[in-house]
Each structure stands twice: as structure tokens, then as C-alpha cells.
Amino acid sequence: MEKYVIRGGNRLCGEVEISGAKNAAVAILPATVLIDGVCRVDNIPSISDVSTTLKILKSLGSQIRYINKNTIEIDNSTLQFHTVPHDLARHMRASYYFIGSLLGRFGIARVSMPGGCNFGVRPIDQHLKAFTALGASVSPMENGMIEVVADRLVGNSIYLDVVSVGATVNAILSAVLARGTTIIENAAKEPHIVDLANFLNSAGADIRGAGTDVIKVFGVERLHSTHYSIIPDQIEAGTYMVASAATGGDVLVKNVIPKHLESITAKLQEMGVVVEEYDDAIRVTRPNRLIHCNIKTMPHPGFPTDMQPPVAVLLSMADGTSIITESVWENRFRYIDELRRMGVQAQVDGKVAVFQGVEYLTAAPVKATDLRGGIAMVIAGLAARGVTEVEEIHHIERGYENLVEKLANLGADIRRVVTSDSLISRAL
């Protein structure tokens, strides 16, 4: 019901502070279910996906207290329910993490099939494979819900047929309190997997090998209260790096872990962008025209699929022909139809998009198709000539904290405005 209005052409300059990682937060918050006590979690991003996750926790009986907007205390000693409401689960993919945590604590979980961005089929067969390997049974229910039940979870070997972040998270969550040892092979290695393991270990879990493709979980009897701070958001950091490059800017991106950004940094440098690394910051400048390059998305430590749409904007303005191959999702190029309205020259064939660089982009009204496709339109609007209006911004606000304020502090001309349709509906 709101939109962004962006007057393009301003160079982004200055400093920006990166928030806590969305993908870590939406795994760690469900993981608190396993702790029969109080947890304090710092560096929580103030985004709608986190808000939805906290609403789910409250619906299960959690007591939540805000210390400040980025620090919360969660008391799960009063937790009593094991069904995640459908109207909340349908808003986000990560709602399926409650299957693993509720199963681990109560031996039963009822959760709807996941929602979130619609850019491909989201099968959870690998999740279910992990649950059944540990001794659970799975039954379909009405309204797209599933019930997972176990008298007692017992450690086992789990081989994931494909590298899946979600299945790796759920395998860890369900194994932490299981009897015996669980070995997860072909596990995902993303930074937020490591962060989840570190959080659980801080509460008394015994998880080893996170960040490699073999994770061992030695089951423990119980977890205790803990105080933990979430890592910086790798994708938000990469987004501001790309935005600086797109506008020919000079931005110091602060509160980052440079090692998490290596694949992004390497591609930006290949395109002629200057990236200077510090201990916990990265400075991004672009002195000349962008150079074409080819990108293939891959599981970590490869180039992240979530950075594919923002970088596509850069390639659309780079000299020559560039190719993006999407190897993670089969339908993640839907946003390109919107970018074509701004002058992007791109042809899509299945999982491959070919970009012919143009001299400049032109403002146009566009709609965010999903979270990362939406932020690509914002970046395009910042670089384009004229005034761009981006609608359906609720997709974008699922993953970016204080986006308008952060961009405005860097010199962007961007406003968040209420649409006329919204005013009419409120009047009615």
C-alpha cells in the first residue's frame, strides 16, 4: 500500500551501518524454542520477516520483551503449543524451521507449507528425510499443513541429496536434543548455518563442523539460557556495495565480516569496481565505466543467489555482453521483465540471462516481484535518469532495515509514500 519514489542520478557517498543477518535471525529465533528458559539475542534486524517470526513465537506461548529495537529477551519456559498458525506461516519461507525446533522440544510439530518469495518450487523433501532418519513420522493434514511426530528422536546419519540451507537448519534443530550422534553430510556451509550452530553451542549444544559439508551433532539432555549477538547481514552489505558501484559512489560499508563477502568482492573487482577491505568495513568506489563479466550463482562459498538480482543491474550498465547463470532457483529472473521498463537489455532462457550493457537506465514505474528482485529495482532507480516509483515494497521490507533512511543518509533522493489506493482503503 506504500511505494518508494526515487529521483535517480545522485552519487551515494558516506558511511552505512549493516544490520544483523536476516537469514541468521529467522533460524536462531525458532531455535530458541529448544531452550526452556530465557535467551537474550542482540543485533536482531528490524524487518518484517523477524516481526512475523516473533508473532509465531508469541502464538506458541513465548514471552518476549524488547530491550531495544535490536535486542530482545525470549522466555520459552511457558511454551505450550506446537502448531504454527497458517496465517503467519504463509508469509515467510523460514516458518518451516519451527518444525525442527518444535519436534526437538515436544516430539510433535504442526506447520503449514512455507510461503515467502515466489521464485521457484520450494520442496521440503530433504527436510522430511532428515526428520524420518531421526525416527519421526510425517503425516499430511488439511489446509496444506503437515504433522511431524516422534516418540523419541535418535541420532542417525543424514545425507542430503542436494545442498539445502533449510534442510541443514532443520536437521540441526531436530538433532540437538536427540539421543546419540547425528551426522549431516552434504550440508550447506553458509555463514548463517555457522551462526545458528554457534548460538546453540552457546546454550549448551554440541555441534561440530558447521561451515563444512559434514556437520556432527552430539545430542544433549537440555539447553540452558544464553546471550548471543547475530552476525552482520552478508546480503545487505553486498547490496550497498552494489548500490555504490551503480551510482559511481564512494561508500564505506561498516559492521561487516569481509570474508563473508569474498565472492561478491571478487566479481565487483572483475567489473572494475575498487573494493578496499578493513577489519570490519569495506569501502567501495567506481572510478570508470563498468566492465562486463559472467556470473554463476552457487551455494556458499560461491556467488550467492540472493545477490544475483542486484548485480544484474550493474551488468545491465556494463560495457559489452554479460551472462548470469542461476544454478540455485529455476525461476529467479522474473524481475527482469520489470527492469526492461527501465531500459535494461536482457534475454532470458531458462536459468540463463544475457545482458547487453546500455549507456544509462531510464526511470519508470515498476513493481517489486520479490525481496531481492525488489531491491534490484531500487538500485536501478538510484542509477536511472528521472523519477522511479517502486510499488509492492512489502517484499523489500521483509529483508532490509531502515532502507529509506540509510540510502537518504548516503545522499539518495528517496521517499516512502502512501499510495492513493491505500488512502482510499483506509477511508473505507
Image (cartoon, rainbow, N blue to C red):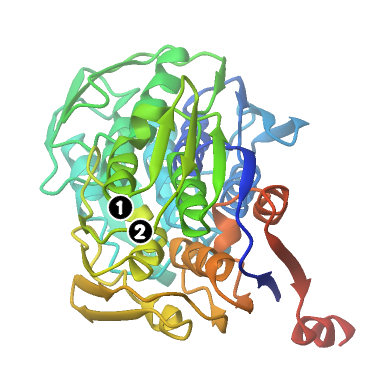
Q: Is residue 146 above or below residue 58?
A: below
Closer to us: 272 or 178 = 272
Question: What's under tag 1, amino acid-wise?
Answer: Met
Q: Where is the C terminus found, in terms of image quarters?
A: bottom right
Q: Position of residue 74 (x, y in %)?
A: 64, 29
Q: Residue at x 59, y 74 (%)?
A: 392
Does any portion of residue 196 appear in the rendered image? Answer: no
Closer to us: 91 or 361 = 361
Q: Position of residue 97 (x, y in %)?
A: 41, 44
Q: Is residue 250 above or below residue 84?
A: above
Q: Residue at x 44, y 78 (%)?
A: 339
**Residue 105 falls in which quadrant of the image?**
top left
Element marked by disc 1:
loop
Identify the residue position indicated by label 2 in the image. 290
Q: Residue at x 40, y 37 (%)?
A: 275
**Residue 338 falls in which quadrant of the image?**
bottom left
Crowding at dot 1, Cα within 10 Å, few <14 / some 14-19 / many 20+, comes out as many
**Mark sitting on residue 108:** none
Question: What's under tag 2, amino acid-wise?
Answer: Leu
Element marked by disc 2:
loop
Q: Residue at x 30, y 69 (%)?
A: 120
Q: Where is the N terminus found, in terms of image quarters?
A: bottom right
3D distance between C-alphas at marks 1 and 2: 5 Å
Q: Is residue 273 above or below residue 219?
A: below
Q: Position of residue 299 (x, y in %)?
A: 22, 45
Crowding at dot 2, Cα within 10 Å, few <14 / some 14-19 / many 20+, comes out as many
Does any portion of residue 256 appear in the rendered image? Answer: yes
Confirm or deny contact between disc 1 and disc 2 (CB under 8 A). Answer: yes
**Circle nearer the N terminus (1, 2):** 1
Q: Is residue 155 above or below residue 324?
A: above
Identify the residue position indicated by label 1 in the image. 271
**Residue 289 falls in which quadrant of the image?**
bottom left
